Image (tube, helix red, strand yellow):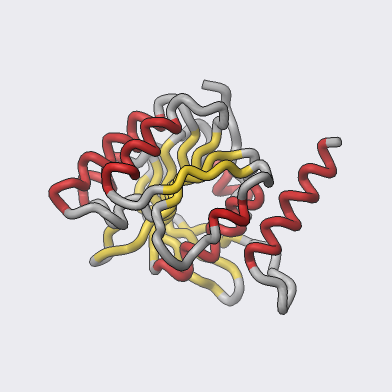
Amino acid sequence: MVFLRWILGCEALERALEGFSFVEFYGEWPCVLRYAHFALSRNTPCLLVYTQLFGGLNAYQLLGREIRVARAFDLLSTIEALRRAFFEKEKRVFVFDPFLFSKPQNFSLVTSALRALSHRKWVLVFNRAFKKLPAGGHFHASSAHTLLRLEPLKGDYLATLIKHPALSSGVRFVLKTEQVVEGVGLLRWIKKESEAQLFLKL
């Protein structure tokens, strides 16, 4: 699998994640979702596996901007989208809220699909916190190569390392993200960033 480096707003963290194909951020969902807009706009081209009925990202406005979207509406379509992503051309796969439609007895199905996908793709998961753990429980938390808890920090973000094969837990990274211009929505910002990247490639 060809190595890709994530752009996450902190060079030290980006170096620490080199070579790990299953990385997850989790935390309070509004914080995670807002940070995900930055990460998504900075790591195109990619495939987005998106499990939301309402709110959050407007997937339709992301199409045609080097971000292809596979949208899921229940547990079965979530697993199917992850399985299909294995054969898609994009090397980066973003997965948003993968356990939204899962009951505890089905968590392992989603986690297994994510693990299988990470054998061929670079997978970055954005997940909710549930009782101080990422949604999906202990088995899921132990399956990710690297796990980080995300918190807001005065306009930036604080990522605390919970699990890493080589580094100690508790290491903290400040993630610097460019501020969205006041009055410009997140989706318009993503479009602007994607258009800039397309222009630079011409």
For the view shown, which residue lies furthest in the top direction? Answer: 1
Q: Position of residue 70 (x, y in %)?
A: 47, 43
Q: Which residue: 58% across, 39% down? A: 46
Q: Which residue: 31% across, 57% down? A: 100
Q: Nearer the viewer, residue 168 or 155?
A: 155
Q: Which residue: 35% across, 61% down? A: 128
For the view shown, which residue lies furthest in the left direction? Answer: 105
Which quarter of the figure has residue 189? bottom right
Where is 41 relative to 178, above or below?
Answer: above
From the viewer's perspective, is 16 left or right of 98?
Answer: right
Residue 148 visible here: no
Q: Which residue: 34% across, 29% down? A: 116
Where is 86 relative to 102, above or below?
Answer: above
Q: Position of residue 49 (x, y in %)?
A: 45, 45
From the viewer's perspective, is 76 left or right of 87?
Answer: left
Where is 89 relative to 39, above or below?
Answer: above
